[in-house]
């Protein structure tokens, strides 16, 4: 019995030391802190995977034989075990990878924009609280555009000089709700809430309207056009 116990102890000691050797490669004190907020999978987590990971770990490519667009794929154990260990972000290889703690294993790989510490903090909080992933297709999370913060500043910066209080080229003014929704002399109602097809402001700000003078003054960067489009699609609320 005594000998058996000793063997068992030796075995346990060996096992523990091999685990710590494995763990010593990763310095978990360097992990970004866990977010204080409890994340929502659809709103906070999946959009990160979708934007930064699915191009290489999705339906088209499964780099490292890993895919993260399905629940089965995300939790499946590969050659080195599971990448996500629910309840333990500090032990989850996926977290080590996105934090750059595994040599030559940074995810996404170096050419892409890395995740921010805030994003990693959210992923950690998600894993620590059980890594909940609802069954079935993942609904798309549609973020509501904030007019005051996101759209109005664009109008002020790029349009108000010619469509503001002092000057209303084409009889169009964009610094007041009623006037803006009423539209201009030639084009009429250029903003039609909920209807992106009929809202000709979108063609105008894409710089695609050659009938307008100074199309270059009307052209906005693609991201801003997308934002205005989303705002109109969501009802063009103007508080
Ligand atoms: C540009 C392509 C690309 C992107 C984007 C990318 N990866 Fe990877 N990923 C790879 C490649 C390539 C491997 C395989 C590396 C190897 O086997 O040495 C890999 C391997 C992995 C593995 C290990 C799988 C296993 O079981 O061995 C995980 C986990 C992983 N990636 C997570 C992510 C996460 C999370 C993101 C987004 C934050 C991401 N990856 C973004 C290319 C990518
Ligand atoms: C440098 C001046 C200038 C700037 C900046 C400018 N516009 Fe214009 N805009 C004009 C002129 C000039 C016309 C044409 C007036 C005409 O043909 O009678 C016009 C016409 C328009 C019309 C058509 C109005 C009608 O006749 O029905 C819309 C809509 C419009 N602009 C929107 C915008 C938006 C949105 C921005 C900001 C992204 C913007 N404009 C920036 C000068 C400007």
Image (tube, rainbow, N blue to C red):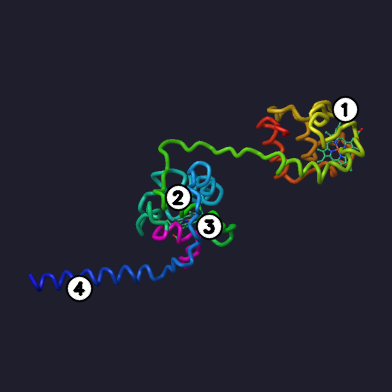
Residue on which the image places disc 2? 126
How many C-alpha atoms fall within 10 Å of the one at disc 3: few (<14), some, or many (≥20)? some
What secondary structure is marked by label 2? helix
> Which residue sits at x=53%, y=57%?
108
Q: Earlier in the sequence, mark 4 or mark 3?
A: 4
Measure the alpha-carbon separation of dots 1 and 2: 53 Å
- Ligand 2 sits in which quadrant? top right
Is 84 within the magenta?
Answer: no
Q: Distance between the residues labelled 4 and 2?
A: 37 Å
Q: Does the beta carbon of the residue at mark 1 sit less than 8 Å from ligand 2?
A: yes
Q: Which of 129 and 135 is in front in this view?
A: 129
Which residues, given as a range, are shown in magenta?
90-108
The yes-or-no answer for disc 2 within 8 Å of ligand 1 is: no
Q: Which residue was labeled with disc 1?
A: 186
Q: Which of marks 1 and 2 is in front?
A: 2
User: Disc 3 marks which residue?
Assistant: 108
CB atoms at circles 1 and 2 under 8 Å apart? Answer: no
Alpha-carbon distance for marks 2 and 3? 19 Å
């Amino acid at each position: 019995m005594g000998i058996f116990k000793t063997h068992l102890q030796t075995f346990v000691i060996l096992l523990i030391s091999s685990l710590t050797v494995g763990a010593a490669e990763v310095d978990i004190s360097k992990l970004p802190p866990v977010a204080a907020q409890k994340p929502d999978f659809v709103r906070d987590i999946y959009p990160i995977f979708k934007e930064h990971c699915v191009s290489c770990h999705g339906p088209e490519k499964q780099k490292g034989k890993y895919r993260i667009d399905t629940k089965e794929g995300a939790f499946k154990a590969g050659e080195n075990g599971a990448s996500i260990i629910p309840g333990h972000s500090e032990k989850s290889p996926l977290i080590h990878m996105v934090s750059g703690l595994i040599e030559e294993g940074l995810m996404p790989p170096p050419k892409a924009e890395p995740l921010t510490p805030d994003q990693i903090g959210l992923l950690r909080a998600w894993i620590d609280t059980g890594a909940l992933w609802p069954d079935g297709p993942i609904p798309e999370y549609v973020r509501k555009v904030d007019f005051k913060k996101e759209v109005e500043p664009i109008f002020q910066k790029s349009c108000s000089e010619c469509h503001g209080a002092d000057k209303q080229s084409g009889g169009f003014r964009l610094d007041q709700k009623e006037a803006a929704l009423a539209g201009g002399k030639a084009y009429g109602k250029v903003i039609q809430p909920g209807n992106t097809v009929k809202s000709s402001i979108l063609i105008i700000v894409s710089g695609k309207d050659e009938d307008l003078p100074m199309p270059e003054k009307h052209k906005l960067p693609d991201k801003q056009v997308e934002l205005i489009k989303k705002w109109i699609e969501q009802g063009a609320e103007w508080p």
